[in-house]
Amino acid sequence: MSARRTAKEELSREAILDTARQLFIENGYEKTSMRQVATALQCSHGAIYYHFKNKADLFQAVVSHDFSKLDLLIDEIMDTDLHSTEKRRAIFLKYIEFGLQNKSHYELMFMLKDQEVQGYLQMHPNQSYEKFADAIYTLTGGAMTIKDMWCLFLSLHGFVSYYCYTSQTYEDVQVLAEGHVDFLMKGM
Amino acid sequence: MSARRTAKEELSREAILDTARQLFIENGYEKTSMRQVATALQCSHGAIYYHFKNKADLFQAVVSHDFSKLDLLIDEIMDTDLHSTEKRRAIFLKYIEFGLQNKSHYELMFMLKDQEVQGYLQMHPNQSYEKFADAIYTLTGGAMTIKDMWCLFLSLHGFVSYYCYTSQTYEDVQVLAEGHVDFLMKGM
DNA sequence: CTTATAATTAACCGGTGTTCAATTAAATTC
DNA sequence: GAATTTAATTGAACACCGGTTAATTATAAG
């Protein structure tokens, strides 16, 4: 193969990010290798190092881009004209969906303590909880205590956290997720 | 060094288990190597293979031993003469206490992603849940659905899982734990 | 034509789980 | 007590895989 691709086939930063994202999400940080990413991109593993300093840097780039997605999803729901109870239900479910469709991101936010990556990522894990709590607080008209909101959050987190460690996708456990959300709303 | 140790310094299965447990707990499954275990034991890495078939087998042996602890704690509560509602509360709280007082064990039991080991291990978390579910089922006189029980379990798991990744001890979050249990019992 | 750019490839270095012939201590037999 | 057998341990070797670097080469741009 030629030592440099033709213009149209040039490796773009975006293409690397997209492929890396997919693999990180699928297999997690540690079980995704630069060589895997390169193979999936059909390029050499060395090429990636032209665009990203190292593996942690690549991961950081992927995650920091996706980090605002959850906030956006919550905003979207808040902007619908659903009834507030339904909005609440939708947010709970969306939270689970997001967590399980971005398992490795979720791990990073709430569960990972890898020092190698930690150095690169100075983010607040509770940032996404704040967004969540604000929304729920608004939707219940302030009728819910801070404490109960935290319990609710932890109970959702339990679902995500558990299924993060299985190979099941969100689609696989969607019905269970809906049941879990119903269970929690019953107690509110 | 001689090719075989003297009788008193012979490598015992128990010694390997104890050292391996410590390392698995400290660093997790994937970041603990057979060579590390051997180094800590001051023996050769080959020696371990005389006592255990392979790494997953060693890990399995460590974890299966520790799993029975939780079952015992539940039995203890069931054998008290508390009222069934109080037993329920006590079991929930004990579950959290166990999880947070054995954070690394808990991680090993419920939060390990390794495919290689999950095959070996998946039986145990489920078995441990069965114990939990049986107890709750008995205490509610069969009034609770299987589904709701699983939700309850996941909601407890959420609490443990979250605080597993903080430096806080069970004592630090005991009040919060009691609140969480109350929150969940309210919804039952 | 020259230069900057972007890709390839080999290589380095350290790590992994696992196997196995060789070795030695202990146990058993004579 | 000596000879033999058995059991436990060693350490080298195997066959990988990992991140990262650097020299090299081919393309595009100026």
Image: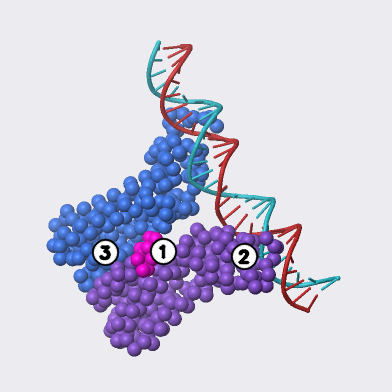
Chain colours: A purple, B blue, C cyan, D red
Write the residue at 29% across / 55% down.
Answer: B126
Q: Residue B180, how many percent across, how many down?
A: 28, 69
The numbered mark, 3 or 1, whose residue comes first in the sequence reads 3
Q: Nearer the viewer, mark 2 or mark 1?
A: 2
Discs 2 and 1 lie in a common subunit: no
Percent of width and height locating residue B67: 31, 51
Circle 2 residues within 10 Å: few <14, some 14–19, many ≥20: many
Is most of the magenta stretch helix, strand or loop? helix
Residue A93 x/y as whole percent? 34, 75
Q: Residue at x 46, y 64 (%)?
A: A26
Mark 3 crowd level (few <14, some 14–19, many ≥20, 10 Å Cα): some
Q: Nearer the viewer, residue B113 or B84?
A: B113
Q: Callout 2, which amino acid? A: Ile
**Residue drawn where x is 37% and y is 63% of the image:** A168
Question: In which quadrant will I find the N terminus of chain A?
Answer: bottom right
Chain of residue at mark 3: B
Is residue A146 visible in the rendered image? The answer is no
Left or right of residue A49, residue B135 in this image: left
The residue wearing badge 2 is A48
Contact, CB < 8 Å: mark 2 with mark 1?
A: no
Which one is nearer the viewer's eye here, A155 or A48?
A: A48
The quadrant holding residue A134 is bottom left
Picture layout, residue B72 above or below residue A44: above
Task: Choose between A120 and C1: the one closer to the eye.
Answer: C1
Disc 3 designates what residue? B150
User: Which residues, given as a range, are shown in magenta?
Assistant: A157-172
Q: Which residue is label 1 attached to?
A: B165
